[in-house]
């Protein structure tokens, strides 16, 4: 098929899933056209079936807010028409689903029918989408999509609960490329960061409030009182400064390393012992899946779709959002030398259930319906 993929080209989960999906489809022989405002972060290899179309927005002094959605819709019209696409797959409802609707209507006037599949990723529903300033457009454009998928059963139910949706939503979970995300031998890195063989706790995110990084640091601060350990924080975002201050206040800053945004996060995960995901909301938890693929067990909150991934008592433990003492108890249990190998083994076994080779056919079969 010839498929147009529209996404946020950033390190955020929806952009990562969309880009990895496009790369995997291209390897299967589909022609994939990315339509975004900049080259996606994970668009990192060459394949004759991959194409990139930049959405450029011309500015004009009158525009306080440049009309990105119009530029995007116009680019979609252009690419569908001249590249003869069979389908548009838009990731993240706002504003991609409504721009796709507009493109579809314009193409209709040219005698071209283009099916649109919208994938809901989480914050487009649970945080931003519900906002009254977006809700009518989100509801309308989801209902106007030919197909709608959500990355977890929880997100599907949340969407039905908060929006008047008259469409069947198909659940297609996040996936992982186990050829890339696997435990690698990084002994030199482990030695440098944990010279006395300390246990390594890790968290990766975009450092927004919804991730509750404060809980990560508080859990770590208690764990290190009982087990020699270090905390690695990967990513960056609005909470970074506050979190640096908190680790100083808790007198833990010598053992907390802020590593910033990393391309090869799997190299860091390869030396870690425990992933901490205490999120307030999380539709799936791709970052936890990436950790599990590198044999890292997970302690998490029970938010959103996380329990559909993290199996309580097997791949890690689940606590109520904000229950730091329970997370500390769980972390100490997993990190015991007699328990850690079993949890690590269970984590990778669970990750295998989300291997790209299992999930990709779900998308391909879904496209065939339209
Ligand atoms: O939460 C993020 O880090 C980014 C966010 C996004 O909108 O790109 O990720 C969402 O989509 C991911 C891919 O489907 C999911 O794995 C994340 O759980 C989801 N984040 C939230 O729901 C908060």
Image (cartoon, helix red, strand yellow):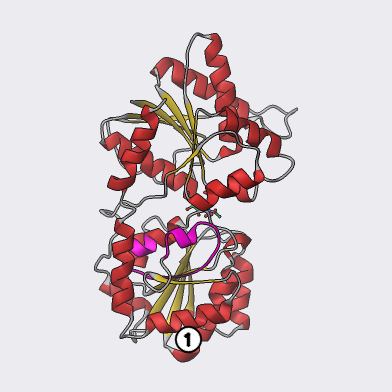
**Residue 90 visible somewhere in the drawing:** yes
Secondary element under disc 1, as helix, strand or loop, is helix
Quarter of the image with the C terminus is: top left
In percent of the image, x 52 and y 9: which residue is there? 110
Nearer the observer, 190 or 173: 173
Looking at this view, is 1 or 349 the one in front?
349
Counting from the top left corner in percent of width and height, residue 367 is at 39, 30
Q: Please state the horizontal and vertical placement of residue 266, each as a whole percent of the image.
A: 34, 61
- The reply, left or right, for residue 166 in relation to residue 6 is right
The residue carrying mark 1 is 224
Residue at point 69%, 27% (across, down): 60
Q: Is residue 122 something that shows in the picture?
A: no
Vertical order, 329 against 14 (above or below): below
Give neighbour class at mark 1: few <14, some 14-19, many 20+ (Cα, 10 Å): some
Q: Is residue 6 left or right of residue 291?
A: right
Q: Quadrant of the N terminus?
A: top left
* Residue 265 vertical placement versus 9 (above, below): below
Asked whether residue 208 is drawn in magenta, I would say: no
- Rendering coords of residue 4 (x, y %): 43, 28
Number of marks drawn: 1
Magenta residue span: 290-310
Q: Nearer the viewer, residue 244 or 107?
A: 107
The structure residue drawn at horizontal position 39% and vertical position 80%, both measured from the top left corner, is: 334
């Amino acid at each position: 098929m010839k498929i147009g993929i529209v996404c946020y080209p950033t390190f955020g989960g929806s952009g990562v899933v969309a880009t990895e999906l496009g790369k995997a489809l291209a390897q299967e022989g589909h022609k994939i056209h990315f339509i975004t405002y900049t080259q996606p972060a994970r668009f990192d290899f060459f394949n004759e079936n991959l194409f990139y179309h930049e959405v450029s927005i011309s500015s004009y002094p009158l525009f306080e807010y440049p009309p990105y959605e119009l530029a995007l819709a116009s680019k979609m019209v252009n690419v569908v028409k001249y590249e003869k696409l069979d389908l548009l797959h838009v990731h993240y409802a706002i504003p991609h689903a409504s721009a796709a609707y507009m493109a579809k209507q314009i193409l209709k006037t040219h005698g071209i029918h283009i099916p649109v599949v919208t994938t809901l990723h989480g914050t487009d529903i649970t945080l931003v989408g519900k906002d009254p300033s977006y809700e009518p457009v989100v509801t309308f454009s989801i209902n106007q999509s030919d197909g709608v998928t959500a990355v977890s059963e929880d997100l599907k139910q949340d969407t039905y609960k908060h929006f008047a949706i008259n469409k069947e939503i198909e659940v297609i979970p996040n996936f992982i490329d186990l050829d890339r995300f696997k435990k690698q031998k990084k002994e030199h890195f482990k030695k440098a960061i944990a010279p006395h063989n300390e246990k390594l706790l890790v968290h990766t995110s975009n450092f927004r409030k919804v991730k509750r990084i404060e809980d990560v640091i508080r859990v770590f601060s208690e764990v290190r009182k009982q087990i020699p350990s270090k905390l690695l924080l990967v990513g960056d975002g609005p909470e970074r400064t506050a979190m640096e201050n908190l680790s100083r206040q808790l007198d833990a800053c010598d053992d907390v390393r802020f590593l910033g945004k990393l391309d090869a996060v799997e190299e860091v995960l390869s030396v870690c012992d425990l992933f901490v995901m205490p999120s307030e909301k999380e539709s799936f938890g791709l970052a936890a899946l990436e950790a599990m693929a590198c044999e890292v067990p997970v302690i998490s909150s029970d938010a959103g779709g996380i329990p559909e991934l993290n199996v309580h008592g097997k791949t890690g433990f689940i606590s109520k959002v904000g229950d730091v003492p329970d997370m500390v108890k769980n972390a100490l249990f997993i990190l015991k030398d007699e328990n850690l190998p079993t949890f690590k083994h269970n984590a990778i076994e669970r990750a295998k259930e989300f291997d790209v080779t299992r999930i990709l056919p779900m998308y391909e079969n879904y496209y065939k319906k339209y």
